[in-house]
Amino acid sequence: MQLEDIKTIGVVGAGQMGRGIGQVCATAEYQVLLVDVAEPPLQEALSKIRAGLERAVERGSITRHQAGKVLALIRPIVQLDRLRDAQLVIEAVPEDLALKQALFAELNRICDASVVLASNTSSISITKLGAASGRPDRVVGLHFMNPAPVMRLVEIVRGLETSERTLHLALDLAKRLGKTPVVAKDVPGFIVNRILMPMINEAAFALEEGVASAEDIDLAMTTGANHPVGPLALADRIGLDTVLAICEVLYQDLGDPKFRPCPLLRRYVEAGWLGRKSGHGFYLYEASGERHETAKGTGSAVWGGACPPAR
Ligand code: NAD
């Protein structure tokens, strides 16, 4: 498969990453088949894409006509089998090895043998997904950053058996999508999350130990280290379930105790505090996804004593 042969891209998983990747592909004039397990997440994805495009029109960065064209190119579907019409597939389902392995085996059954299957995984081994797919030479990591329409980087991850041809197709596609690709070895967390997750995890430990409030930890890193967003606010944006899943992969696969996930993070996920997407994480959020202006961060200096602030 050459880049010119790709007209339709399948994106599996219409959560915050899948919908962003779908928008990026449609903006580059690809037909997009956006797949999820049910209609509600697909409708939510479309309305979020529409709202994002509307804001871009208001800012003057795109015309209303362009926004309409992008939306028209995204087709929401619940039947995975429809991906037989795609010439490339990007998987963006939750960060769960068994789920992704089953999906890659299924995609191998559905898609033409020439089709490259890419994963947006943040940390899971591309080699493992390649083995599950039955076509390891045509499996590659295509790791977009969040939010995908805004962030320039895409990490291209080469599994043990990823072919040179697949690697170059992934590089060419990333450039065609207007992104800056970097190639990373297939090691847990690749480049960005190998460095970013220990920082977020350490911020959670600092909160748990009562070093400072969530607001002050974030303020220290934005004003003291010039980060555009603090680590705890960033964790809420990524999703605490995703952050924990990545930390688990780093801890287990690298076998180094320095990657041990913070117990406070684990406890928040157990409580269903997943960050922005559940309305509650280190901070509270409105239904619109905006930060609750008056609420304080939810962290407490007492282990496990973190309690929700009054709404
Ligand atoms: P999410 O929870 O927002 O979305 C996942 C979506 O996948 C949901 O809509 C869910 O219904 C759907 N899904 C679950 N099982 C499915 C299946 N079998 N078939 C089709 N759809 C299915 O998760 P996310 O934050 O978008 O993360 C998705 C992937 O992207 C993960 O591998 C994650 O590590 C990676 N990633 C996340 C971020 C981030 O900041 N959140 C950044 C880069 C990469």
Image (cartoon, grey):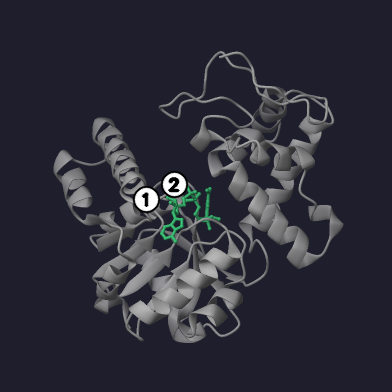
Name the residue nearer the viewer: 239 or 178.
239
Ligand 1 lies under 8 Å from the Cβ of mark 2: yes
Mark carried by residue 16: 2
Residue occupied by mark 1: 19
The tally of labels here is 2
Distance from Cα at disc 2 to Cα at disc 1: 6 Å
- Residue shown at 27% from the left, 61% from the top: 32
Ligand 1 lies under 8 Å from the Cβ of mark 1: yes
Q: Residue 120: x, y in percent? A: 49, 62
Kind of element beneath mark 1: helix
Mark carried by residue 105: none
- Is mark 2 in CB contact (under 8 Å) with mark 1? yes
Amino acid type of the residue tagged 2 in the rendering: Gln
Q: Residue 303: x, y in percent? A: 82, 30
- Residue shown at 17% from the left, 45% from the top: 68
Kind of element beneath mark 2: helix
Q: Can the viewer see residue 156 in this picture?
A: no
Residue 50 lies in quadrant: top left
Q: Residues within 10 Å of mark 2 (few under 14, many from 20)?
A: many
Amino acid type of the residue tagged 1 in the rendering: Arg
In screen coordinates, is 98 left or right of 108? right
In screen coordinates, is 17 left or right of 208? left
